[in-house]
Amino acid sequence: MLPSPVLAKATSVQSALLSQLRRARKSTPLTQAQLAASIDINRMTVHRLENEPDMATTRLSTFIAMALALGLEPTLVPMTNSDVLLIEKK
């Protein structure tokens, strides 16, 4: 089990990542259903990830697939006092 501060940081990063993915999708004409179909997942999974980020559990590959489908490139960066994971435009 992860120590509490590490788990809290991981949850915070996940929430920020999902917020970025939601904003990115809303800036495109893609619906949740279209995004889901493009990466072969259920629309309810996209809905849950966008609307319940603190409750979301999913594979890292799903996050990456969503980002790529939205024209974003996930990038790991060294840990600082801010985010540990950024999503940058290609």
Image (tube, grey):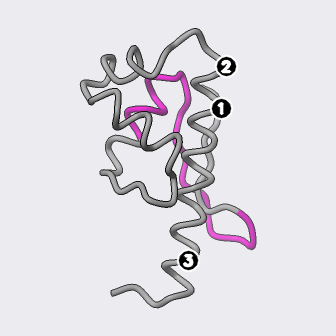
Element carrying mark 2:
loop
Query: Spatial distance from mark 2 to mark 1, Cα to Cα?
Result: 6 Å
66 part of magenta stretch: yes
Q: Residue at x 34, y 37 (%)?
A: 45
Quadrant of the frame with the N terminus: bottom left
The x and y percentages for residue 20 are: 63, 40
Mark 2 or mark 3, which has the lower sequence index? 3
Query: Spatial distance from mark 3 to mark 1, Cα to Cα?
Result: 23 Å
Q: Amino acid at mark 2?
A: Ser
- Label for residue 27? 2
The x and y percentages for residue 56 are: 41, 54
- Label for residue 23? 1
- Label for residue 68? none
Q: Kindly check if marks 2 and 1 are in contact, taking CB atoms under 8 A apart as contact.
A: yes
Q: Residue at x 61, y 14 (%)?
A: 28
Residue 69 picture quarter: top left
25 part of magenta stretch: no
Image height check: is 47 above or below 13? above
Q: Which residue is mark 3?
A: 8
Start and end of the magenta stretch?
Answer: 64-82
Q: Amino acid at mark 1?
A: Arg
Local packing at callout 1 (Cα closer than 10 Å; few below 14, some 14-19, many 20+) is few
